[in-house]
Amino acid sequence: MHKVSPLHLGSVALVLYAVTAGWMIAGLGTPLVSQADAQPQAAKLTQPVMFNTAEADAILRKLAIFPADNPWNEDISQRPLLKNSAQMIQGIGADKKLAYNLDMSFVLVPSNQPKIPAKIVAYPDESDPGPYPIPENAPIENWPLDQRSLAEAQQGTEEGDRHLIVVDPGARMLYEFYQARKTAAGWECACEATFDLKSNRLRPDTWTSSDAAGLPVFPAIVRFDELERGMVNHALRFTVRNTRRAYVYPATHYASRKTDPNLPRMGERFRLRADFDVSKFSPHPQAILKGLKKYGMFVADNGGDWRISVAPDARIKDLDELRRLRGSDFEVIEPTGPKAGPRAAR
């Protein structure tokens, strides 16, 4: 989903099969560690590691994804509401169900991963320069649940967002590609955004990313390792069909011509109401809902209403329980700025 597609529903994968038996590995069950309290992970990788493995889980448990005072790690459970929160919820759909996409796969690479060029075909002026550490086993959005081989997914000619996410946990660097594709001439993409996970630095003002809001995708992905620990300790990303021609910190880009003040801006932050009872949900959905109360979720792109992003990991269970929630279970908060909230002391 991107600024070139003001109303793109994206690919929705709602199946948990078509995966190899080798991925069905139980979590290691370590104590809960939030991203804000995590310590930087020393680079111990010797080869690329796919997101849906126990080895990736062990690395991600220790990886500090952005500083503790970064917006993604900010506790917004006590923030006041926007004055038009109710109108904004109603406009998106107070009766619509919370939904999810099993879409955002990613790969972890060692810090000495060879870097290669990628041709930027649409937004070279809003992309970070290469080369990039793209490994041979780089997964494309929706793989492996789209039931294609990895090579077929990499070379696919279908339309769509085709996100490619590469994480270097040793250097704490993130590389995200929009409409990535492996061709006979090498890799190409519409846009590439590089993020330093050690910094609060944003994209340049008005720049897009692989998301229309100019935000990173990886920090928002619901992952198996954190669900096993009992709580998602970061903000999520979600999409809505209609957004406003505006953005708010930490977003840097909009993708709409509409100016209705009751439409959400890119970067608008929502949270699950504090009085919503999560006790009757299974462990994995409950971990998501706890996170939505404390950290909320950002409007990141145009797409289906109330859709959050989850890693396409067959070990994640019971997500259909999320359909019990409606838009009316959420509220829109007054966000903090670059020198407010936990960043005020800087």
Image (tube, rainbow, N blue to C red):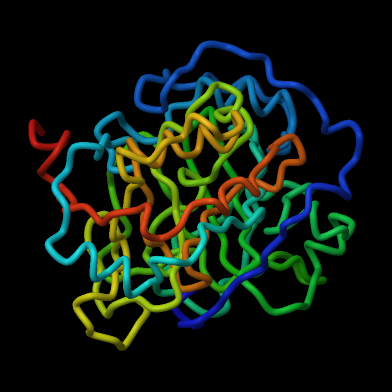
- Residue pictured at 38% horizontal, 66% vertical: 94
Residue 14 screen position, x and y as percent: 72, 57
Tell me: residue 289, above or below residue 55.
below
- Report the number of discs: 0
Point out the residue furthest to the top here.
Answer: 31
| 10 to the left or right of 290 | right
Query: 307 and 196: which one is in front?
Result: 307
- Residue pictured at 41% horizontal, 24% vertical: 34
Name the image quarter holding residue 197: top left
Residue 12 screen position, x and y as percent: 67, 64
| 69 to the left or right of 238 | left
- Residue pictured at 77% horizontal, 40% vertical: 314
Q: Can residue 48 be seen in this view?
A: no
Tell me: residue 322, above or below residue 101.
above
Tell me: residue 180, above or below residue 339.
below
Residue 260 screen position, x and y as percent: 22, 83
Name the image quarter holding residue 47: top right
